[in-house]
Image: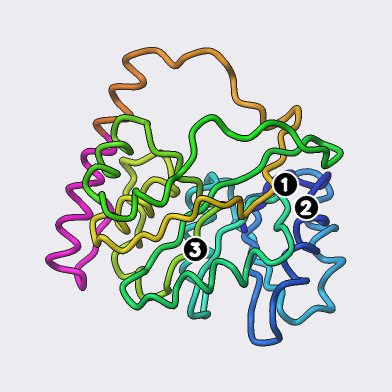
Amino acid sequence: MASCDGERFIAEQIDSILSQLSTRDELIIVDDCSQDQTLKVINSFNRDPRLRLQQTPQRTGHVDSFAQAISLAQGEFIFLADQDDVWPEGRLERMVKAFTEPDVNVVAGNFSMIDENRRPLGPPQVRLLARYNVAPWRNILGILLGRRAYYGCCMAFRRPLCRELLPIPRSIESHDLWIAMVGNRQNSVKHLEESVLLKREHETNVSSPIRRPWPVIIRSRLGMLKALLTALQRARKPATNNAG
């Protein structure tokens, strides 16, 4: 989990995660210089040995926080979590079950929207479909065009995938899309049509309805193309990863 100024909802999220972990599992939180009471809330769970807290010396952004958390993970499967969402009961079990297929390295699902008080909102307009399992390069094209709804908070992957994932290329804005890109490059993504997360919408995380300027969109797409080239290079030489 990456945290930053998330005092309002992070306790509920930590509770929802810890309630599904076994004694062998761990919850790694990388805090990116929170200025509110987030650290105090996290430390209120310090009696639970499964929780590990790391603090960044200076603010670096959520992508770097997730990259650090991923690098510290020791478990067989790595799940990503945002600080203000909620894991529904049974999420962990359902997603781990999807890994029973040996060629699956990434599992990606959908989410249901909730408001600040955990009241249900409408479903997302764009969802992942099971038929995407057999269309990896079409999925990559969809990523480049902004037509595939991959969210890190709805994903899990096998730890050996880190050899190709890390370091996350600087050219890409989103760790979510990078993981999806690498998984689809391997043809190893299992898409679940069910909701595996309660994603919270609140006043500080609501996306702006204003469309980004075309130069920004083009720069973002070029960055993703560069990241795709990095993924292809790492597939050939996985032992010599360098940031793209």
Asked if residue 229 is positioned above or below residue 237 in the image, the reply reads above
Is there a contact, CB below 8 Å, between mark 2 and mark 1?
Answer: yes
- Disc number for residue 125: none
- Indicate the secondary structure of the residue bearing disc 3: strand
Mark 3 neighbour class, 10 Å CA radius: few under 14, some 14 to 19, many 20 or more: many
Amino acid residing under circle 3: Ala
Give the x, y percent position of residue 3.
67, 52
Of discs 1 and 3, which sits in the foreground?
3
Asked if residue 185 is positioned above or below residue 24 in the image, the reply reads above
Q: How is the image coloured?
A: rainbow
Whether 233 is among the magenta residues is yes
Please identify the quarter of the rendering in which residue 117 is found: top right
Whether 151 is among the magenta residues is no
- Indicate the secondary structure of the residue bearing disc 2: helix
Amino acid residing under circle 1: Asp
Give the x, y percent position of residue 204.
72, 30
Q: Nearer the viewer, residue 184 or 202?
A: 184
Query: What segment is highlighted magenta in the picture?
Result: 223-244
Give the x, y percent position of residue 107.
45, 61
The residue at the far front in this view is 131
Amino acid residing under circle 2: Ile
- Disc number for residue 84: 1
Mark 2 neighbour class, 10 Å CA radius: few under 14, some 14 to 19, many 20 or more: many
Cα–Cα gap, marks 1 and 3:
18 Å
Write the residue at 38% across / 75% down: 101
